[in-house]
Image (cartoon, rainbow, N blue to C red):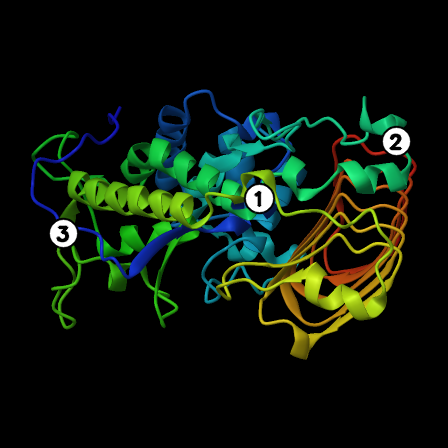
Amino acid sequence: MTDPIGPSTSTIPNPSPTTLLHPRREPFEHGLLPMQKLIFTDPLQALTSLKQKLVSSSTQRVDSAALADALQISLDHARLALDAFASVLHSESDPLVTSRFDDVDSVGADLLDLILFLYIQSYKRLLPRSHKDAAAVADVWPSTSAFDGYLSALSPLQLVRCNTRRFMPSQADEKAHQLSYLQKHLANILSLLSEPVEGEGEESLVISMEGFEHLGFLIQFEDKGSDGDFLSQAAPIFANSDPDMPAVPVPASQVLDWLLQNIASSLEHVTEKNPAKENGPPSGSDQDVAMADTSPSSVKASPSVRSPCFIEGVSKSSYVKQASDLKNSSLKVINCHDSVIYILAPLRYATIYGCSDATIVLGAVGKAVRVEHCERVHVIIAAKRVCIANCRECVFFLGVNHRPLIVGDNHKLQVSK
């Protein structure tokens, strides 16, 4: 049994002031499944054993039969897990990304990426806030409906007036929460990606450049003016590697120290950049919004193409966005009511959250759509995958490649494919 990696006493480069570490939102927002057998009390011990079992029984690709046997779950659940895993992969070159649902078994999942996917199944999401000092954290599954209890007694218009962004985790809150999770679990994660040095026992773990690149499933670096596609390009610990020779593995403790410094810098940056956003912006969503006034106030441009575009607070109006209007590949439609919203643009990911009495049209979502905590909403979607959670009296017209996933506390849904 390998112990979590301890801090190193060696000298490591300081984080670059122009380089920030970002959590990849997609696994945390679109990759979590309501399957109890995927949530481990001791993920390091369980997944170390699972990794050894899968390595001994297969190649570096894992099919649903091997996963079902290793986790003692049904074949259907194993296929569902692999399908969800494929929807949040970071590497577009992975053959699983473009495979059809029926071809998942023949392609299989990369073992180390799959291990990271299974590890974060125990991640706990931030829940909507009752006030700024009562941020609640609860297990992702099962989740209570947003309309139970207090909110269930409100009319949609009252819901508009009370359910402003100040009662929901902001993007900065969610990012800080994900960074804190990574900070807490990074030693375990690196242990799962590392290998012992031959002849020196399990306590001397090293990580190769290839193993380091697997962290791209959970994190990404973004230099100013650069996309930072390869983690090793941003890591000085691999920067002096001879391009004509295989990179020399690095002590895992040194990698841990360097990443923890970057996470601490990123957390500090988030705090400094968003000190006043905890209370949320002033809300004008309880007033009728004319179409001419909607665009500038309801769409919030993101500082990076990696961040989603927000459309929120649209009330009693019609709203249209085309490809030329959006600079981002991800979109979130939040707290929109009594409106008709058309998003006629190609996207990779989309989220519809907390909307009521609205018609929402999404076109060409290449990865996944999540619809959550909505009431009396008509949703028309062309997408690869759709997840519906905690919705009531909603009608879905779906053009999807994969079976829709319906989880949580749902009531009186109508689904047409």
User: Which amino acid, by three-letter code, is at mark 2?
Assistant: Leu
Q: Which residue is mark 3?
A: 13
The answer to whether residue 129 is left or right of residue 193 is right
Q: Are marks 3 and 2 in contact (CB under 8 Å)?
A: no
* Marks 3 and 2, how far apart at CA: 55 Å
Residue 151 visible from this viewpoint: yes
Residue type at numbered disc 1: Ser
Query: In the image, is residue 147 above or below residue 363?
Result: above
| Mark 3 neighbour class, 10 Å CA radius: few under 14, some 14 to 19, many 20 or more | few
In terms of sequence position, does the residue under pointer 3 or pointer 2 come before the other?
3
Numbered badge on residue 376 = none
Disc 2 is placed on an element classified as: loop
Q: Nearer the viewer, residue 64 or 163?
A: 163
Residue 405 percent across, percent down from the top left: 73, 44
In the image, 175: left or right of 34? left
**Is residue 52 in sight in this rendering?**
no
Query: Would you place residue 36 above or below residue 407 in this image?
Result: above
> Alpha-carbon distance for marks 3 and 1?
32 Å
x and y, in percent, of residue 256 in the image: 23, 40
Q: Which residue is mark 2?
A: 154
